[in-house]
Image (cartoon, helix red, strand yellow):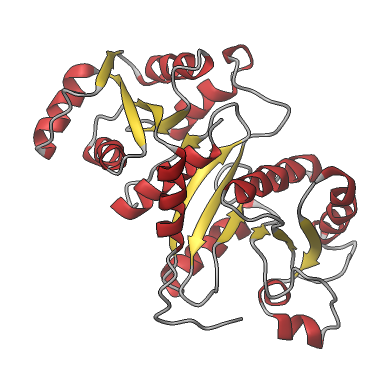
Amino acid sequence: MQHLEGREYNVFDEVLAKAKAKGKIRVAVVQPTDETSLGGAIDSAKAGLIDPILVGEKQKILTTAEELGVDVSAFEIIDVVGDKESAAKAVEFATQGVAKALMKGNLHTNDIMGAVVKRDAGLRTDRSITHTFIMDIPAYHKALLVADAAINIAPDVNVKMSIIKNSVELAHKLGIKVPKVGLLSAVEMPYEKIPSSMEAFELTQRAKDEVSQAIVYGPLAFDNAISALSAKIKKIDSEVCGDPDILIAPQIESGNILFKALVYLAYAKVAGIVLGAKVPVILTSRADSVEARVASSALAVLASE
């Protein structure tokens, strides 16, 4: 692993530049009735990334804007009462092509994602809905994508294939021509008592036919994935080792622990996006910085059609 303290390269700056070059998109923001969600939408609009459609209870939106000290008169506000109703309206805009992405506001994730995955809503594809983080880690030499640490709890091999494909497509849109994908487990060889290692081996074989313009390899323990020296000592011969663009976690617990460990111990900056539907979905968190919220919007711009 390369230790690059003080490096000038900034992952988020590059993502932002690519998104601005592509051009801003209309985004339906669902229930932006708290300072975090409305502020995130406004910050992203100020950055020239999105043209927000604010969908939710109009009076609450206006009150929140007043509390923030911001003017939202330039933005379209669709007055809808109720979280589920607001989510359904936003999804309708996406289905009609009016909005090219969705952004979660002050409502439960289940409410917005429930509207997205509804069979008759028109946003489903042949892929599973998955989540991918992009991380800027001071001790790593480039962007690192981590999936799925937020949506799929215990994905089977077919869902994992969607996670891989969705992440690879995002990497392509980030300008990574042939992303290197490491499939994580606790060991670096198939072992029947560790199901994730068996699945990683199967996915490695399947990916040769099913995933284009990517190098997919597993199983890999984290040290083998991130350190070429560690892989060499264990006689693992793969281009992925020491240079992954994407790490695929075996299940949500390990993915969640991995990304939070990188944030809190390795000072990583992180942004994320939901993929697999016809439009990307931005899931903001109360703990997100302005930079992270804007970077997530930039990812949505790049991921949108």
Q: Quadrant of residue 166?
A: top right
Q: Nearer the viewer, residue 145 or 30?
A: 145
- Give residue 218's position: percent from left, percent from top: 81, 63
230 w.r.t. 152: above or below? below
From where the camera sits, is residue 289 visible? no
185 w.r.t. 27: above or below? below
171 w.r.t. 265: above or below? above
User: Quarter of the image containing the C terminus?
Assistant: top right
296 w.r.t. 119: above or below? below
- Residue at 30% x, 44% y: name it: 47
Q: Is residue 102 found left or right of 130 in the rendered image?
A: left
- Give residue 127's position: percent from left, percent from top: 71, 32
- Residue at 73% x, 27% y: name it: 126
- Give residue 192's position: percent from left, percent from top: 90, 61
User: Quarter of the image containing the N terminus?
Assistant: bottom right
Q: Is residue 283 found left or right of 216 in the rendered image?
A: left
- Give residue 203's position: percent from left, percent from top: 84, 52
| Residue that extends furthest to the front in the rendered view of this protein | 21
Q: How many marks?
A: 0
Q: Quadrant of residue 165?
A: top right
- Residue at 50% x, 68% y: name it: 261
From where the camera sits, is residue 104 visible? yes
Q: Quadrant of residue 182?
A: bottom right
